[in-house]
Image: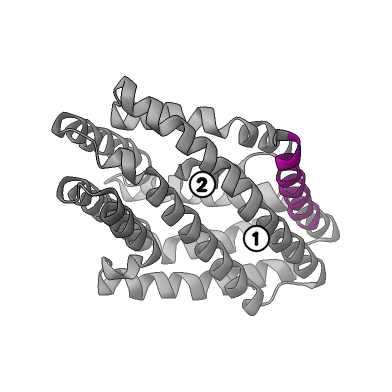
Amino acid sequence: MLAISALVLASCSATRVAYDNADTMLRFMASSYLDLDAGQSDDLAPRIVRFHQWHRSNELPVYAALLRSASQRAAKGITAEDVAWGLGNLRSRYRRFAAKAAEDAAPVLATLAPAQLAALEHKFAESNGKYAKEFLSSDDKERRRRQLKRMLERFRDFAGELTPDQEARIEGFALAHDRHVALRFEDRQRWQRDFVAALKAERKPEELGRRLAEMFDKPELRRSEEFIREDRRWDEDLGQLIVDLDRSLSAKQRAQVVRRLSDYAEDFAVLAGRRKEAA
């Protein structure tokens, strides 16, 4: 179910199609990760449909409002407070989304057999191996090159072509937070271990749902002091980076940022409105 959160990174033309077909994609992903049997798949399918309807009705209107506000803020000029506002809202909406997904899926997750849990652990290990190979190379130069490439792509997606000075600022940020990428990966692995441990320990759906929801809602409970410290520094430095970049935007770049955010807001508003058509 977490895959829906990635849709905001898709192109505007693709977002509506992808979201409207998200329930099919989620069933495929669940089957791939969990190796569900026929009965479990039949039980999960309507739960995914209901979750998708809940998300469309309750979350998409909020996303649209937040993105409209973000577009207006970008038009005026971004401040550090705007960045903190954006990060805070992004995290709070994600936690709400993930906790709800976990609670809704708990009745099926509580039925997973040992072999299915082993398959899940194998899938996690496989996914982690691919991520580590791509972004955590032992070759410092190659690792930093790939991390910078990914970050530059994200900024270009919103602002278009960047100037050499803008790219240099982003590179400085990426180099200063090289350790943060590894810490996030360690946190991801720790979450996966805790997730599997919860599935093994809790067989009552309500208790499992509560425990999984807490894992998403209170991630700081599992995080190391180093992660919390570096994550806070990352937030602060990202805020300053975005403010500095905002001051350097050309009129064309600012117009693209504003348009991109506005287009996403429109997409989410349209998608939220389709709940009436589906009813």
Residue 64 in the figure: left or right of residue 229: right
Choose mark 1 or mark 2, whichever is in front: 2
The amino acid marked with disc number 2 is: Arg
| Image spot of residue 164 (x, y percent) | 65, 56
The range drawn in magenta is: 258-277
User: How many other residues sit within 10 Å of disc 1, few (<14), some (14-19) or many (≥20)?
Assistant: some
Disc sitting over residue 262 in the figure: none
Q: Is residue 200 above or below residue 215?
A: above
Q: Main secondary structure of the magenta part?
A: helix
Q: Residue 246's image quarter? A: bottom right
Residue plotted at (71% across, 48% down): 268
Tag 1 secondary structure: helix
Is residue 275 magenta-colored? Answer: yes
The amino acid marked with disc number 1 is: Gln
| Image spot of residue 267 (x, y percent) | 74, 45
Name the residue tied to disc 1. 166
User: How many other residues sit within 10 Å of disc 2, few (<14), some (14-19) or many (≥20)?
Assistant: few
Tag 2 secondary structure: helix
